[in-house]
Image (cartoon, rainbow, N blue to C red):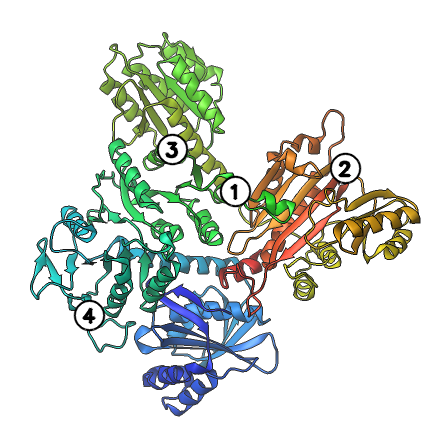
Amino acid sequence: MSDVEALLAGGSVVLVRPVVPADADGLRHLHVDASGSNRRMRFFTVGDVTAAAYAEHLAHPDDDHLALVAVRDGEILGVASAEPTGTDPAVAEVALMVTDRLHHAGIGTLLLEHLAAASRRAGVTRFTADVLSENRAMMTVFADAGFTVSMARPEASTVGVSVDLTGTTMLAAAVADRERRAGAASLAPVLAPTSIVVVGAGRNPGGVGRAVVTNVLAGGFTGRLAVVNPHVAPGATIGDVPAYPSVADVPGAAVPGSAGPAATAVASPIDLAVVAVPADKVAAALGECGRAGVRAAVVLSSGFAETGGRDAERELVAIAHRYGMRLVGPNCLGVVNLDPRIRLNATFADLRTSTAPEGAGVGLASQSGALGIAVLEAAARRGIAVSQFLSLGNKADVSGNDALLAWEDAPGVRAIALYLESIGNPRRFRRIAARIAQHKPVVALRSGRSAAGARAGASHTAAAVTPDATATALFRDTGVLAVDTTEELLDVTALLATQPVPAGTRIGVVGNAGGPGALTADAAAAAGARIPELSEATAAALRRLIPRAAAVSNPVDLGAEASPAAYRSALVTVFASGEVDAVVVLHAVTRAQPVSAVVDAVQRVADAHPGIPTAGVLLGAEPPRGATVPWYSFGESAARAVARAGHLAVWRARPHLPAAVPGFDEPAVAALLATAPRSTDGWLDAGAALRLLDLVGVPACRTVPVVGADAAVRAAADLGGPVVVKSAAPGLVHKTDRHAVAVGLASPGDVAAAAAAICRSTGSDALLVQTMATGRLELTAGLVAPAGGVPVVLVGAGGVHEEVLADKALATCPLGTGRAAAMLDELRCAPLLRGHRGSPPLDRGAVVDVLDRLARLAAIAPEIAELDLNPLLVDEHGVTAVDIAVRCHPSTPDGRSLHRDPVADDYARALG
């Protein structure tokens, strides 16, 4: 495995990597310097001779021996090893050793996770260990890790432990839970610090650092605040805040000579450093913070990757992680937390904020500081309480994924809003966001969606899977509510921060003006909601209660002079009907009724029916702010917000477990991809691609790969009947454009002439000879898995007119049960699959099966970069793949695909 930076349970960063011979001294110190109790638990003896010998053994592993270490600032904090037992290659003996001062920090569990993943890739399916019966800490590590554990001889002095490494849902849940808790803990010093040091605040007013100090003081921060300025004298203050010449001088800094950065020898360490120094001084400031035991840093300074300084930015991350710190920024605005227990405004902006009703706050993470300021200001004007704000800046370390983890269980954050210019780790985003969206709404605005961001794909599938299309599919498949404008981000967030998620997409519209009501209904329908006609019983009740109502079907028009009592009666009736999932209430302001009385009536009815979300609209007056019902200036804005929220309910109701795919030969697929011939740019040769399709279980027409025209003639004779001859040149996509396909060839002479012409046209003698395949509909299907990206499955109208028709549907992997069928329903050509104007229904189930198999292939074969089936012929009785192209990623020196997450992906592969 490669080196991996990971989080401990407390949120600090460590490096997990394989042992190398240079670790000999560090491993010896880890074992020999351990307490007698620690050595006894590991070696059943308190002596150091055995410990030293074993450390030497670990430092020189052979091919059958695997050992991983957790390292921080050059110090080995723990080691985990898997030794072959000598009897069964699928069984290894596991052992763990963690430095005494960091027991219960999660090092053992973290090492066990990574060791198990690496061992699984080497073919090991079970760990064994003999553990002293009194070694409860080791028993806890095994039990809490999520593996299936069995124990033998529990009454003896040693217990035989067997750990099944097979992936289970319990294991996946345990890994996810550890990720969640560690991620939240890593941002606790940023979002809820008890002590802050501002590095770079000047003695005179002005400047970024001094502005941060002013804001922290003005916000009433409840913790300790200090300033670092190298030019101050001992005992000085800056802005009435104690100032020190270095971080090491600040109370709470690590004591010099303590046992390294992993052990801060103070009771109250410094939680957060806000760094506002020139770019060329940031690295030194971070190193100083790390040596002082600071837990996290927010770097406001610019002049890094955004201006071309990527290497300097990487150095900042390396320094922070060397000392276990998380790094926010650089080039960011800062952080805000309005929790009364924290009261933090560590930004340099002049911000207005709005206090949230208890439990109704919004967590906002923005990659753009300027947009963050604009959203915060607009939210304050509208009474939307952004209770926590995180400016991500360049996202060198802390990203939107980390913000999601921090707010997943935060009690003061009811909804999460994101502004993202990029998604650095889409696979991790998919995993985290899909889990959070099940219980907490996530709203996202993304820039960079224009066609200019699309790459020219090598295959039909890759060309169709543009960055924007992928991001759109990613948000939809994770339950994230994607919005198109900053205003819509505020509209949707305002609703979800105060109202429940609707149970569905049925919207009722109640108001006193017919025109705005109709426009509201149109906007809701355009956003994918339904405006159901109310039942006769409900309509009759409305007519009886409100005789002057102009319309009672939906929208409900109460008439221009509708009183607060009319609104109350209408809303109670509509709420009680069970015929809508949410209500938009419009009031066009007139002199006939006092606005405050109407607003109060709506608010009281909505509060009495908390299970049905309500959005209010005031036309002709300033909407009230900060109420439990969100109020909008226009009905269309409210309708779109409610409709988007309804889509979340629909997503939550879908099954999300991967579809079952029987008859899938996974070992054979792995063996083929490990040995298949491929071009220098990763394209499998035609024969290997066809064998892969057969192993995956996708039907293909009879095909014979050949070289040259003479071989094509012989193959055609063996196949019999009319044949197709086409080029098999690697990476050739548009064969028709290159005159690289000839169909309906019956005679040897026709085959020979066509084959020779194709070879001349393409410059390649590689050919395919196929039987003539027929079908009633041509589709394209495929898989794209960009390096570092999330795998995407595509289906669409295929054949030579695929680009012109542009009829396609995308979904990210894994595909939940029923997702492939839903993809087909998204196509404009979907009626052709069901049967259209007398044509028979085609085999939709066979197409669904192909898509599910491609998604499964993405899970078990991450080395595949793209796979293209075009055309995929469909008839009444099945499908037939005619053309297949497969390209693989280059591999890292240890053989892993570039886009692989070594732990999460390994378990995802095992679980489907």
Label 1, secondary structure: give it. Answer: helix
The disc label shown at residue 266, or none: 4
Q: Measured along the vertical axis of the image, is residue 812 above or below residue 513?
A: below
The kind of residue on which mark 4 rests is Val
Amino acid identity at mark 3: Glu
Point 90% across, 49% down: residue: 720
553 sits to left or right of 823: left
Q: Residues within 10 Å of mark 1 (few under 14, many from 20)?
A: some
- Check disc 4: other Cα within 10 Å, few if <14, some if 14-19, many if 20+: some
Lower sequence index among marks 3 and 2: 3
Q: Quadrant of residue 538?
A: top left
| Residue 737 in which image quadrant | top right
The answer, for residue 579, to whether it is visible in the render is: no
Tag on residue 723?
Answer: none
Residue 181 can be seen, yes or no: yes
Distance from the alpha carbon under mark 2 to that under mark 1: 30 Å
Viewed as shown, does residue 720 lie left or right of 773?
Answer: right
Residue ID for mark 2: 876
Q: Which residue is mark 1?
A: 473
- Foreground tag (3 vs 4): 3
Rounded to the nearest angstrom, the CA distance separating label 3 from label 4 is 47 Å
Residue 488: which disc? 3
Sequence-first disc among 2 and 1: 1
